Amino acid sequence: MRRPKKDIQFTSYDDLLGISENNADIDKVLEVPLKDIYPFRNHPFYVRDDEKMAETVESIRNYGVLNPALVRVRDAGGYELIAGHRRKRGCELAGKDTMPVIVRNYSDDEAVIIMVDSNIQRENILLSEKAFAYKMKMEAMKHQGIKKEDGQPADTADLVGKEAGDSGRKVQRYIRLTRLVPELLELVDNGKIKFIPAVSLSYLSAEEQNWVLRCIMDNGAAVSSAMAETLKKHSEDGKLTELAVQLILGEEKRDTGKVTLPGNRIKQYFPKEYSKQQIEQVIFELLEDWKKNH
């Protein structure tokens, strides 16, 4: 029986692995050498040797692996890990040579969905992890052509975010983050660029994003939602240049009465014979033109 739509249903470990009373006798737990277990292809979740991992290692040393990992057979030999990457790492750090697993014959799309759903509810997931995980799950579910009870195509984005309680719109925003250059995405994970501005920046080309990155790294510029939207609009209109990026991201500093622009980057836009006064005049003319259009 379905619960009301407002209730978020969290998938149990047994549900994710497909373990039920009906097939409990069919599932056999095997002890497989760690060297024969390979990570999931393009696994979007990091496995960190952090405090949580230390707790996992201690538990494995004291009690063993309480929940078997889920794997499938690889064409090239060995097993592909679907759920249990942290447990495998814990076994390695605990000095184990083998790990208990359940072997299932899942298709690529089924394996992706289970892999994502078994990790998406973890604590402290990075925005980039969630972004790439949602992208993988979205593609897998589209391949399956999931439909509603009335036979109409289901809203894939809504279904993708259901396990984590995210709306379809938010799922789409997360997936936009996968379009950021790696260096900007790292700043998002570190909290130096907030989620909403990051989504706007994802609409910029790779070259334009690198202009933003240089401005942040050289000047310590902060990117507000308003600035990111302005950058996006300029990009869509074909008006975004590196100088425009510097001026837009310097807007917050202008509010304090002081603007700092790196001289070496400014000079590359002017003839060598231009004096400081001439350069300033051109910049102010550009600012006036920019002001008229905003």
Image (tube, rainbow, N blue to C red):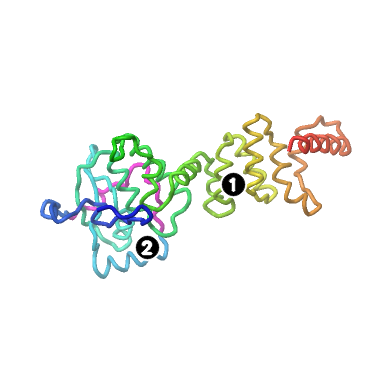
Quadrant in the rendering for residue 275: top right
Q: Residue at x 19, y 48 (%)?
A: 103
Q: Residue at x 48, y 50 (%)?
A: 127
Q: Nearer the viewer, residue 208 or 1?
A: 1
Magenta stretch containing residue 38, yes or no?
Answer: yes
The disc labelled 1 sits on which kind of residue?
Pro
49 to 275, vertically: above or below:
below
Q: Position of residue 225 (x, y in %)?
A: 62, 47
For residue 53, the mark is 2
Label 2 neighbour load within 10 Å: few <14, some 14-19, many 20+: some
Residue position for label 1: 197
271 to 2, vertically: above or below:
above
What is the magenta range? 31-48
Q: CA distance from mark 2 to mark 1?
A: 32 Å
In the displayed structure, does residue 62 sit left or right of residue 268?
left
Question: Which element is circle 1 on?
Answer: helix
